[in-house]
Image (cartoon, rainbow, N blue to C red):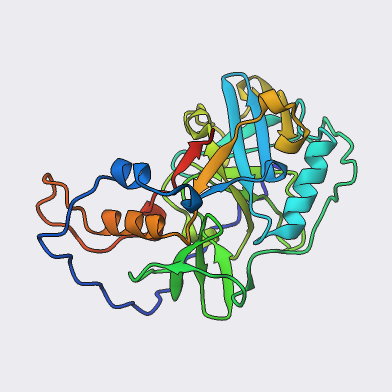
Amino acid sequence: MFARLAGLVGLGVLAACASSAASPGPDQPVRSLAEILEQAPASDWRTVDQNNLLYMQLPAGRVIIELAADYTPLHTANIQALARAHYWDGAAIMRSQENYVVQWGRDEADPRPMGDGQATLAAEFDQPRAGFEITRLPDPDSYAREVGFAHGFPVASNGARTWMAHCYGMVGAGRGDTAESGSGAELYVVIGHAPRHLDRNIATVGRVLQGMELLSVMPRGTGPLGFYETPAERTTISSVRLGSELPANERVNLETLRTDSETFRAVIDSRRFRRESWFLDPVGRINLCNVPLPVRVGG
C-alpha cells in the first residue's frame, strides 16, 4: 500500500516560451517583501475556511494543511470524511525520501474504518481551464504552456485543462498503477526540489500552510524510496482533525495572500526583479515554485 508512489518517474515536455518582461526603471522605489506585505490592504488577504483545514498532530507539534476544494473536490470531500472518522488517529509517517517526499497513512496490518470515506476515487489530475482565473507568470516553463496561481495554489495549464503543480509544500494523494486507485487515505508532501514530472499523474490535494518545518526534518528512511524499514523508525500521528470540528480556542485563523490581488502581483515582481543592493545581476524572471505564497495568522 505504501509503495504507491514508486512508479512515478516520468519527465515533462518543453513548453513554448513566454516573452520576458522589461526590467523596471532605476527610479522605481525598492520595497522588500516584508514591506509589500505590511502595506497590503485587508481585502488582499483571504481567510481560509476551517472546513478545508487539516490539523495533523505530531509528537513535535502541529501541521496545518489547506485542502484544494476547487481543484480536487472529490478528494477534498473524501479526506474530510476520513478526518471526521478519525481515520488517521494512530497512523504514521512511513516514508521520508531525501529531496523528494514525506508520506503518511495507515499500515495494512492496522486497518481502521473509513466512515463515509471511499477506498478509491475517480482521478482528479486536472480540471477544465474555463472558470479558473489564473494570475499568470510571463516566464517560460518546462512543463506547461502556462503557469501561475489560482485560489492560493501554484497551477499550470495547457490551454484546455489546468492542474496544481508539485511545488515545495504541496500535498498529494498516493495511488497505485491505475488512475482510479487513490483516495486520499495515503498522503505525501513535497520536501525537496519540485518534482513537476508528477504533475497530471497524481491528484495534488492541497498545501501545508503551517508546520512544514516538522515534516522536512523527518529522519530519512533507509529502505527503498525512503521507506522506513522498521515500525520503530516511524513517527506516530496522534490525530488529524478538520478545523471546523475543533473547539474555537484550538483553531488557528490562517490567512493567505489572495493570488488575484495587486499585492500578490507586487510580490511576483519583487521576486522576478531582485532590486536589493546585494543583487548585481537581477535575472528578471522566475520559476513557478520559487514564488512565495504568504500566510499569516489573522486577528
Q: Pick the quarter of the image with the N terminus.
A: top right
Q: Position of residue 202 (x, y in %)?
A: 63, 59
Task: Please name whichever residue, 259 or 121, is drawn nearer the observer in this view of the structure.
Answer: 259
Using the image, determine if residue 282 lies above or below residue 136: above
Task: Please name whichever residue, 101 or 227, is drawn nearer the observer in this view of the structure.
Answer: 101
Q: Quadrant of residue 189?
A: top right
Whether residue 227 is visible here, answered yes or no, is no
Q: Pick the quarter of the image with the C terminus.
A: top right
| Residue at 57% across, 66% down | 163
Q: Position of residue 238 (x, y in %)?
A: 71, 23
Q: Is residue 147 left or right of residue 94?
A: left
Whether residue 50 is visible here, answered yes or no, is yes
Task: Please name whichever residue, 199 or 243, is drawn nearer the observer in this view of the structure.
Answer: 243
| Residue at 25% across, 45% down | 32
| Residue at 82% across, 44% down | 81
Q: How many marks?
A: 0
Using the image, determine if residue 143 lies above or below residue 117: below
Q: Position of residue 230 (x, y in %)?
A: 65, 24
Q: Quadrant of residue 229?
A: top right
Task: Please name whichever residue, 136 or 156, is drawn nearer the observer in this view of the structure.
Answer: 136
| Residue at 69% across, 29% down | 92
Q: Position of residue 48 (x, y in %)?
A: 61, 45
